[in-house]
Image: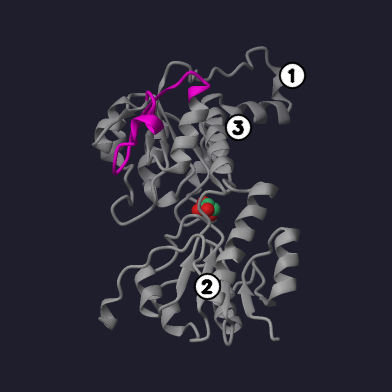
Amino acid sequence: MNKPILAQTEHFTKDVEARIERDFTPRRVAPDSPSRREELLRAADGADALFISPVDRLDAEFFRRVPASVKVIATFSVGYDHIDLRAAAGRKIALANTPGVLTDATADLAMLLLLGASRRAYESEQLLRTGAWAKTSSARLLGWQPTGKVLGILGMGRIGQAVALRARSLGMKIHYSNRNPLSQELAGDAVFHESPLHLLRVSQFLSLHAPHTPETHHFLNAQTIALLPAGAIVINSARGGLLEDEALIAALKTGRVAAAGLDVFEGEPNINPEYVQLQNTFLLPHIGSATLETNSAMGMLALDNIDAVLAGVPAPSLVKLPADKSLA
Ligand code: DGY
């Protein structure tokens, strides 16, 4: 029997690649190809499924051109702001993401950002690596202690809750804002703020975990940064578009925001170059889910979804697509 054709734009972990080789006829687009999108469209010709990542922007134009053979697209991410859902619905293509399996890895990474920013990890490491430590007696860089401080969490889904769990072990007080308050059992002693703006007023540390949507775009900007306590620390491991780079950079320059830990950037991998010039930033290249175990679990879940859609059975994690008005 012919195996289904799968077009993919990334290299996955060995176990995931082995399963692809076993169950599919793979068509691989080189991840660093400058014409990755065109190559994906070419590889999609006659393909049953696409396996993509957030680097692939699937907009309305993409969905106009994607061949009719494609029945399902799986993204190697929980976030799907890189995909035009309405256009996917218009083409009746199922879309799957990878929720749940990357919660711990991403929450760990948020804590790395929180500690890296607050303990001035970049400056300290630089001091050591450049040999300056040996040359000065005043090399101790004083950071900011999380103990007893308020950590404001914007977006209290799975990852936000896992961050709260970890931050409690540092002795932090948890406040959060979310579309709906958590049940008492899940919230524990976390304080709910119906208004995200009220959350900002108390957040000595702020960690962003909301999806990037038109409503949350540039949530953190000059006006909202002004609501934070002076010297707040900002953490973003969700999506770069949640904050306005120029406003954050201006606040980091004056110390209005003492430090920032960032793993995601608007327009990444091309980031605002001023971030790299600043000493009070701790910057990582979008590695929230990047552990061997988590990448394996994400790949396996994506393939489970593809298998299910192609077999016509319920898939474990399909993204709900909006109703397609053009077909009504
Ligand atoms: C996700 O899964 O959305 C992570 O940010 C990786 O892109």
Quadrant of the frame with the N terminus: bottom right
Q: Residues within 10 Å of mark 1 (few under 14, many from 20)?
A: few
Is residue 85 within the magenta segment? no
Q: Earlier in the sequence, mark 3 or mark 2?
A: 3
For label 1, the residue is 134
- Percent of width and height locating residue 212: 38, 53
Identified by mark 2, the residue type is: Val
Q: Quadrant of residue 172?
A: top left
For label 2, the residue is 309
User: Residue at (41%, 72%) from the top-left corner?
Assistant: 59
The disc placed on residue 305 is none
Magenta region:
168-189
Q: Earlier in the sequence, mark 1 or mark 3?
A: 3
Q: Secondary structure at mark 2?
A: helix
Q: Residues within 10 Å of mark 3 (few under 14, many from 20)?
A: some
Q: Secondary structure at mark 1?
A: helix
Q: Residues within 10 Å of mark 2 (few under 14, many from 20)?
A: many
Relative to residue 48, is residue 26 drawn left or right?
A: right
User: Residue at (55%, 63%) from the top-left corner?
Assistant: 53
For label 3, the residue is 122
Identified by mark 1, the residue type is: Ala
User: Residue at (63%, 13%) from the top-left corner?
Assistant: 138
Relative to residue 296, is residue 185 drawn left or right?
A: left
Question: Between marks 3 and 2, how big is the CA–CA gap?
Answer: 45 Å
Q: Nearer the viewer, residue 84 or 243?
A: 84
The answer to whether mark 1 is within 8 Å of ligand 1 is no
